[in-house]
Image: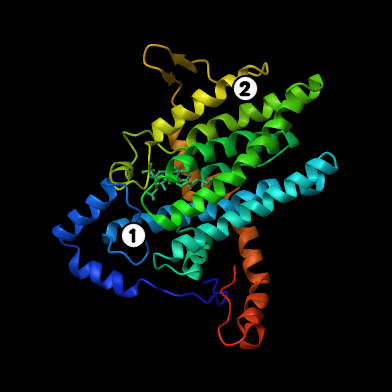
């Protein structure tokens, strides 16, 4: 256990008991009617136990991805080329941690404590995004992350911000504003390398080649394999399927990459003008499942850093929880 002594409220204990007792067809129908009408579901509202469970799983995984996702870029703060790139990267990494904070708060409204979420991350029980288990070997890797992984995240988040669970949607709205800025700085750095010296362009091409498959994996397994999509789309938690989001990403970003004279490491990548869909080689899904099971190149390193931070930050959380720190009610802390 990595108990850091978090203080949290569990506002939904009563509702959760109610749901288990009364997850009956009438309530379910009324709930689904609200969703069909486009209403937002709020923490105090009745919801099916499975809706709550799925939201916790997804939001928690998203929150973990934000804080783990800060690590590969964070290692480049001291090595960013020049003062402006360094400032932008510091700001971006801080934003990502803030996104984690917003998302943990959103997940807490569903009744899972921050402590339990962190424990599940550190024990390997909870997943986080596949893409953050790869090394950022060169500055070009950071550039590819800043441009294309943030772009992929935006495709997902802009869609899901229109979903059904109020606290998650509001967190995503805020996150999308900041991610748009991240995308701009990533694109700017990407263009700088693509139009720079032959050495810079080659470094970027190499990073693109290595990151392409993880980026294709990012949107999740194909629709025919995805276990959660159907229900989550019906409940408007996911607003588009994995394949549709992948397609939206390819549509928006492949032309931007190719117009800079870069290539993508997939000979089959091509838009079928008749169907309007992109065709591509199937990425290695066995590899994807290995990575999200904990066997990617950097999974151990990433979790070790978080464990270190958890252990070394415990004293400050304890200090902040003392009554003297904030009066009668101690503050919940990250
Ligand atoms: N990285 C890690 N795990 C992933 C993944 C990814 N890129 N894509 C899918 N998975 C996992 C799912 O968590 C699920 O595992 P589980 O059944 O053990 O929980 C499994 O692969 C099957 O995938 P699927 O049924 O398609 O899962 P899903 O409905 O959760 O869809 C996402 C996957 C990524 C589209 C969805 O989780 C999502 O939109 N998450 C929020 C956004 C986010 O986390 N972004 C990453 C950080 S920016």
Where's residue 83, x and y in %? 85, 43
Instruction: Determine which residue is flagged by label 2.
Output: 257
- Tell me if residue 196 comes above or below residue 227 in the rendering: above
Residue with the mark numbered 1: 52
**Which residue occupies 28% across, 57% down?**
50
Classify mark 1: helix, strand or loop. helix
C-alpha separation, residue under disc 1 versus residue under disc 2: 39 Å
Where is residue 112? Give x, y as percent: 42, 67
How far from the left and from the top, in percent, is residue 232?
Answer: 32, 46
Q: Along the line of sight, which residue is nearer the eye, 46 or 202?
A: 46
Quadrant assignment for ligand 1? top left
Q: Residue furthest right?
A: 82
- The x, y position of residue 85, in whole percent, is 79, 41
Residue 300 visible, this orientation? no
Q: Residues within 10 Å of mark 2 (few under 14, many from 20)?
A: some
Q: Is mark 2 within 8 Å of ligand 1?
A: no
Tell me which residue sits at (65%, 88%) in the image.
Answer: 324
Residue 197 vs residue 307, the one in the foreground = 197
Q: In the depicted view, which residue is nearer to us: 324 or 39?
A: 39
């Amino acid at each position: 256990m990595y108990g850091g002594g978090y203080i949290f409220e569990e506002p939904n204990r009563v509702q959760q008991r109610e749901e288990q007792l009364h997850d009956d067809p009438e309530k379910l129908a009324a709930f689904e009617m609200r969703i069909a009408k486009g209403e937002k579901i709020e923490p105090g509202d009745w919801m099916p136990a499975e809706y709550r469970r799925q939201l916790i799983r997804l939001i928690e995984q998203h929150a973990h991805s934000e804080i783990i996702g800060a690590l590969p870029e964070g290692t480049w703060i001291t090595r960013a080329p020049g003062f402006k790139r360094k400032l932008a990267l510091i700001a971006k990494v801080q934003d990502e941690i803030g996104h984690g904070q917003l998302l943990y708060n959103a997940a807490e409204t569903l009744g899972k404590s921050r402590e339990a979420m962190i424990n599940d991350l550190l024990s390997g029980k909870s997943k986080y995004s596949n893409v953050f288990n790869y090394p950022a070997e060169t500055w070009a890797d950071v550039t590819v992350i800043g441009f294309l992984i943030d772009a992929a995240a935006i495709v997902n988040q802009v869609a899901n911000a229109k979903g059904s669970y109020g606290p998650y949607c509001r967190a995503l709205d805020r996150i999308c504003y900041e991610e748009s800025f991240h995308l701009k700085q990533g694109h700017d750095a990407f263009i700088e390398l693509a139009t720079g010296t032959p050495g810079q362009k080659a470094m970027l091409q190499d990073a693109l080649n290595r990151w392409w498959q993880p980026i294709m994996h990012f949107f999740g397994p194909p629709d025919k394999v995805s276990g959660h999509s159907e229900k989550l789309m019906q409940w408007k938690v996911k607003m588009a399927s994995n394949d549709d989001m992948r397609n939206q990403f390819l549509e928006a970003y492949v032309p931007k990459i190719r117009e800079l004279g870069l290539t993508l490491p997939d000979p089959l990548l091509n838009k079928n003008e008749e169907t309007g869909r992109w065709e591509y080689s199937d990425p290695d899904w066995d590899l994807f499942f290995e990575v999200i099971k904990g066997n990617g190149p950097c999974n151990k390193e990433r979790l070790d850093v978080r464990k270190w931070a958890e252990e070394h930050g415990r004293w400050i959380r304890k200090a902040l929880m003392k009554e003297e720190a904030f009066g009668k009610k101690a503050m919940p802390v990250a």
